[in-house]
Image (cartoon, rainbow, N blue to C red):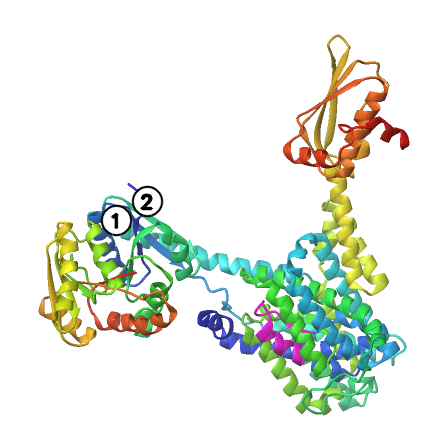
Amino acid sequence: MPDHNKVTACVDHSRFADYVTDYGAWAAQRMGTLLDLLHVLDRHPETAASSSDHSGAIGLGAQDDLLQELAESERQTLLSARERGRTLLARLRQRALDAGAAEVDIRQRLGELTQTLVEQAPAIGLLVLGRRGASAEQSGRDIGRHVEAIVRALHIPILTVTDAFTPPQRVLIAYDGGSMTRRAVEWVGAQPLLAGLDITVCMASTPSAQTEKALDWARQTLQSRGMTAQALARAGDPESVISAVLKEQNIDLLIMGAYSHSPVRKLLLGSKTADLLRASTIPTLLLR
Amino acid sequence: MMQTFRQDWLSNIRNDLLSGVVVALALIPEAIAFSIIAGVDPKVGLYAAFSMATVIAFAGGRPGMVSAATGAMALVMVSLVKEHGLQYMLAATLLTGVLQMIIGWAGFDRLMRFVSRSVITGFANALAILIFLAQLPELIRVPWAVYPLVAAGLAIIYLLPRITRVVPSPLVAIVVLTIVTAAFGIHVPTVGDKGQLPDSLPMFLMPDVPLNFETLRIIFPVSLAMAVVGLLESMMTATLIDDFTDTSSNKRRECVGQGVANIATGFLGGMAGCAMIGQSVINVKSGGRGRLSTLTAGVVLLVMVVFLGDWVARIPMAALVAVMIMVSIGTFNWGSIRNLREHPKSSSVVMLATVAVVVATDNLALGVLTGVLLSGFFFAHKVGSILRVSSRADAEGRSRTYTVTGQVFFASADAFISRFDFKEVIDKVHIDVSRAHFWDITAISALDKVILKFRREATEVEVTGLNEASATLVDKFAVHDKDGAEDLLMSH
C-alpha cells in the first residue's frame, strides 16, 4: 500500500478524535491508501513550566544544575504525555480498523502542530482535522485555534469534520466558475474518494447563459469520469445560497476551494472561507 | 509573523513579569559594581543596564537573554576611561555598536564554530575570576566592619533560598545590610561615595569629543576589542539559553541587535554592554522566557533607581561585594576543575591558557584568540599524526613500494619526508598514495622533494593513486613533472 498520498488524521485528547478517525478510515478505505493517525505533542518551550524560584541566587554549578533540572522536568512531563498519547493512538487505531480501514499507521511527533504538518505535507494526500480540538472545547471557540493556521499554511486537500460521523452520501461543490473552484471540480473527478456519491455543483449567481456554460463544464468534467452530477444556480450571496441548499438537499459533505495564493485575495477570500467554515455544521473538504 | 510576535512576547506573561522584576533587582548591584570597575559614575552603568535590556528586548535574536552593563566590557574600557575620560568612552560605545552591527551582519555567528568548548569554559572561568578580582579593592584597606558585613551578606544570599524562594535573596541581603549600617551608624563605604547616581531619566546626548582622526585613533582599538568581546559573550550566553530552553535563536539578529543596543546606550550616556551569563541564568531560573522579561527588567530597574536614588546611595559597598561574589561563583564553571584530570590534556591546556591570558591582560578577546589558536595547533598536531608510511621491497630487491596512508599537510610534511629511505640502492620506487590526502602546497612540495631526492640517487619514481582533490593541488603547484625540475632542486 503506498504511503505517499496517504490519509493523515490529526487526533488529540478531545472527543472529536473519534470522528476524525472515522472520517479518516472512510476516506482511506475509498482512496485505497494508508491511514496515518498523527498525534502531535505540542511543546511550549516559550512558556516556563513553573517558576516558584524567585531567589535570584546562583551558586556552585548553577548552569549545570539548571540545565539538569529543566531537562528532567521536561522529561517527566513528556514521559506521561507520551504514554497517554500512545494509549489514545492504540485505541483509535483499533477503531479505524473496525471501521474498515485496511492499513493504519500511528505516529506521535514532538513540536508545533502546524509546523509538523508542513514538514509532513509532501507525503499527505488528504488531511483530516477536527474543526475544534481539545483547546476549543475548553475555550468554547467555534473553530479550532489551529485550523485556520493549518489551512493557510498547507497546500493539500483538508477535510475538517464536526461532531458526528455519517458516511457522506450527498455532496455539494461550492462553485463560482473561477480557476480555484474549477480545479476543485477536477480534483473530485480524478479521485475515487467521492465516486458513486450524489454530487451537486452549486453556483451562487443569477441563471444566465454564462452561468449555464460554467455549470455545463463542471457537469461534463464529472460525467466524463463516470460520476453523476447535477448542477444548480441560484441568485444571492454565496454564503446564504450555500447554507440554504445544504439544508434543503440534506447535504452531508461540502467541498470548496479555499484561500487563493495572492496575499490580497488571501485577505479577502480567506476570511470568506473561514466564515463559511464557521457557518457550516457539516464536514467540509477544502481544496487548494 | 503575528504568531512569532505572540510567542516572543505574550506566551509567558506572568512568569516574564515576575522574573523581569527579579532580574532588575539583581541588575542594580551589578550595574553599579561594573561602573566602579570601569571607573565611571554608577549612573553610567545603571543607564546602560536600562538601555541595553530595553533595546535588546526588541532588537535581540534570543528572547529571554539579559543584556546590560557587563564586567567583560568594563574591563576592556578601563584604560580608555582613565586616560581620556567619560566622553571618549561614550564615543567608543557608539563605535562599538556600529562595529558590532557590521561584524554581526557579515556573519560573526558562523565564526563561533571555531571557538571550542574548552575556550568557552575558559572564557566563563576567566570572567568569573575577573569579577572576583575586581572586588578586592573594596576589601583591602577598608574599615574592619566591612568583613562581617560581606560575610553576613553572603550568608543571607545563600541561606535564605533554603527557607523561602519567593523573594530574591540578593535583594534581601542589600536591604538588610543597608538598614543595619544606617541603624547602628556603622561607617563603611557606600554606593554614594563612588560617584553620582541617576536623578532623572536618561537623555539623548552626543558624546562631547572632537570628530577627527585623532579621536578615532584613540577609540578604535578599544571599540574593536569591546565589539568582539561583547559578541563573544553574547553568542556564548545565547547558546547556553538555547540549551536551557531547548529552542533555537537567531544569532545573526542577536549580533546586530547588540550593535543597535550599544548605539542607543552610547547616546543615552551609558557604558557599552553585552549579554550577561549570570543574569540570564537567573532569568531562566525565575521562569523568564520571552522578550517581555528583559523589557520588564530594564524598565523596573530605571524606575527603581530614579525614584529610590537616595536609598540606593546608602547601600554599603559590602552588600554589593557580596552580590558580586555570588555572581562570580555562579559564573565559574566548577565542573571544569574536576574535568582537568579527566579531559584530554590538550583541552585542559586550551582552557587554562585562555584563563591565564585573560587574567594577565584583562582582555577577554585576547584570551579567546589564544584559546582558538591553541585549539588549532593541537588539532593540526593530532590530525598530522594520522600518517603512516609502510614499504616493502619487490622485484628481487630492484624496486620498493611505499604505501602512504593519512593526512599530509603543513603539520605532517616533515614527518612524511622522513619516512622515505633515500640512501637505499634501488632501481625503482613506487609510491602509492591512494589512501592519503594532500591538503596544501606544503604537502605537495614535500612530495616533490621526495621525488626529486630519489631521482638524484638515480632511482626512478612512480606515483599512483593521487585522489582527485590531491591531484588538483599537484597539477597546480607541483614541479617534479615540469621541465627543469632538477635545476630547481639544485638552486635550493
Front one among A41 and B468: B468
In the image, is B47 to the left or to the right of B445?
left
**Which residue was labeled with disc 2?**
A3
Query: Is-magenta flag for residue B56?
Result: yes
In the image, is A37 to the left or to the right of B407?
left
The spot of residue B339 in percent (x, y) is 72, 50
Q: Residue at x 84, y 73 (%)?
A: B218
Query: Is-magenta flag for residue B452?
Result: no
Q: Sequence-wise, which precedes: disc 2 or disc 1?
A: 2
Q: Residues within 10 Å of mark 1 (few under 14, many from 20)?
A: some
Q: Residue at x 71, y 59 (%)?
A: B333
Identify the image quadrant of residue A159.
bottom left
The magenta segment: B49-68
Front one among B378 and B315: B378
Residue occupying the far top of the picture? B396
Residue occupying the far front of the picture? B483
Q: Secondary structure at mark 1?
A: helix
Q: Nearer the viewer, mark 2 or mark 1?
A: 2
- CA distance separating discs 2 and 1: 19 Å
Q: Residue at x 64, y 60 (%)?
A: B107
The spot of residue A128 in percent (x, y) is 28, 58
**Which residue was labeled with disc 1?**
A94
* Above/below status of B346 relative to B308: above
Chain for numbered disc 1: A
The spot of residue B272 in percent (x, y) is 73, 75
Chain for numbered disc 2: A
Q: Quadrant of the C terminus of chain A?
A: bottom left
Q: Residue at x 14, y 50 (%)?
A: A224
Identify the image quadrant of residue A262.
bottom left
Front one among B181 and A219: A219
Q: Quadrant of the N terminus of chain A?
A: top left
